[in-house]
Image (spheres, rainbow, N blue to C red):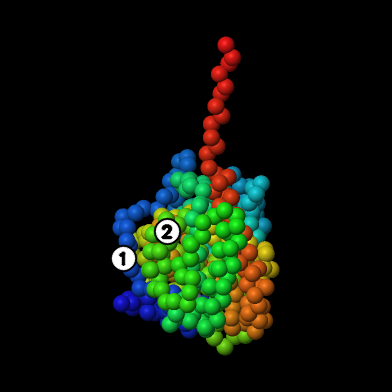
């Protein structure tokens, strides 16, 4: 049974936010299947000094940037900064959660704050959003290079999604991506390969049973009475203390989890995977970047591996729906998805410890 909070969230999503998945993706807040599992957040070196604003722990961006080896430059003194390293760049501004990381639009879980001439980000945003996207692998246990990919075409059977096209196009994109990824030597399983209904928990359970190393759920978006809104959104499951990006701040809607969910063990890698996929969707499809966002999607909650949900475009946009209806554009989406997955696999491969060089014994 849905809690009052999740019923309200469903109402919010249906009535305000342009989220095609709507209520179907907003499952009740299930109890954690692995209670007590703590997210891995050790930080190399001494912990950064924290300071509380309200009930949230924050770290100074100057300290966070230095910890990641990035140079801090004021773009607007006291208000807006850039953090730059050899392969990373972020721009952050006070009083917003909307930041730019490596050219992509990313929503933090907490507001950036200015105080005493310095900027602060929440400790959770530093550890689970900025660090993974600016320096993958920083401060967390490494995962093995992925071998098994599970792709999840949203909806199916009696559940059409935003329209009958959503479940059909999602399955078509996923089948195309499966072919591309299988050709590059990865094992790819689908949660459904026909027009059948699966509930949200069944999807993550199937991924877990397949021993998936990563999971991507594919959807198409919709917004009522709007034929213009278009673009891509990439979602990760919100860390325990953070709200969904679309939360409206209503006190009677807590929009928070009561504990870490299984997928929160992978918050760092969820962000790394999201970035890889986000980069290819925006770069390869040349579509509008609606951002990497947080939500409590039921399909991600129970995962025992990193996972993301992608809203690949709006079926309510006259122009975008026309493109999505063509097999050629769905092939491009599949290629962007496959490239994003391969990018994440390559990142993890590059982080694996190098085998020690065996010294050759001197000849007698
Ligand atoms: Zn959907």
Q: What residue appears at the point 60 percent right and 75 percent down from the top-left corner?
A: 313
Residue 345 image offset from top left, x and y in percent: 56, 52
Q: Is residue 158 visible?
A: yes
Q: Which residue is mark 1?
A: 31
* Residue 108 to residue 200: above or below: above
Relative horizontal placement of residue 59, taking residue 316 as reference (left or right): left
Sequence-first disc among 2 and 1: 1
Residue 91 image offset from top left, x and y in percent: 62, 58
Q: What residue appears at the point 31 percent right and 55 percent down from the top-left corner?
A: 36
**In the current view of this chain or complex, which residue is farthest to the top?**
364
Foreground: 221 or 69?
221
Q: What residue appears at the point 58 percent right and 63 percent down from the top-left corner?
A: 179
Which quadrant holds residue 35? bottom left
Disc nearest the viewer among 2 and 1: 2
Q: Split into 4 quadrants, where in the image is the C terminus?
A: top right
Residue 61 image offset from top left, x and y in percent: 55, 52
Q: What residue appears at the point 49 percent right and 71 percent down from the top-left corner?
A: 193
Q: Is residue 22 visible?
A: no
Q: Which residue is mark 2?
A: 210
Q: Tag on residue 151?
A: none
Residue 23 image offset from top left, x and y in percent: 43, 79
Q: Secondary structure at mark 1?
A: loop
Which quadrant holds residue 358? top right
Foreground: 303 or 11?
303
Q: Secondary structure at mark 2?
A: loop
Rounded to the nearest angstrom, the CA distance separating label 2 from label 1 is 22 Å
Q: Residues within 10 Å of mark 1 (few under 14, many from 20)?
A: few
């Amino acid at each position: 049974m849905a809690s009052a909070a999740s019923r309200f969230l469903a109402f919010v999503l249906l009535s305000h936010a342009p989220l095609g998945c709507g209520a179907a993706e907003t499952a009740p807040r299930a109890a954690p299947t692995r209670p007590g599992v703590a997210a891995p957040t050790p930080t190399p070196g001494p912990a950064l000094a924290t300071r509380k604003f309200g009930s949230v722990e924050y770290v100074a961006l100057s300290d966070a940037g230095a910890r990641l080896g990035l140079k801090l430059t004021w773009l607007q003194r006291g208000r807006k900064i850039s953090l730059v390293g050899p392969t990373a760049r972020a721009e952050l501004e006070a009083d917003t959660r909307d930041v730019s990381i490596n050219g992509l639009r990313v929503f933090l879980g907490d507001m950036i704050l200015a105080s005493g001439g310095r900027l602060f980000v929440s400790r959770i945003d530093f550890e689970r959003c900025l660090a993974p996207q600016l320096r993958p692998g920083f401060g967390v246990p490494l995962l093995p290079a992925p071998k098994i990919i599970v792709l999840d075409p949203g909806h199916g059977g009696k559940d059409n999604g935003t329209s009958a096209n959503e479940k059909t196009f999602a399955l078509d994109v996923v089948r195309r991506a499966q072919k591309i990824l299988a050709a590059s030597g990865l094992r790819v399983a689908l949660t459904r390969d026909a027009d059948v209904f699966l509930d949200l928990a069944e999807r993550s359970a199937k991924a877990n049973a397949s021993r998936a190393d990563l999971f991507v759920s594919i959807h198409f978006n919709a917004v009522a009475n709007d034929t213009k809104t278009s673009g891509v959104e990439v979602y990760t499951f919100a860390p325990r203390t953070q709200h969904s990006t679309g939360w409206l701040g209503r006190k009677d809607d807590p929009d928070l989890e009561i504990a870490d969910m299984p997928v929160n063990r992978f918050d760092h890698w969820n962000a790394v995977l999201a970035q890889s996929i986000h980069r290819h969707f925006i770069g390869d499809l040349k579509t509008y970047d609606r951002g990497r966002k947080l939500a409590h999607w039921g399909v991600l909650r129970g995962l025992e591996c990193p996972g993301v949900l992608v809203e690949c475009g709006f079926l309510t946009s006259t122009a975008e729906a026309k493109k999505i209806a063509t097999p050629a554009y769905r092939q491009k989406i599949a290629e962007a998805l496959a490239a994003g997955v391969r990018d994440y696999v390559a990142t993890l491969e590059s982080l694996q410890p190098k085998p020690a060089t065996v010294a050759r014994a001197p000849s007698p």
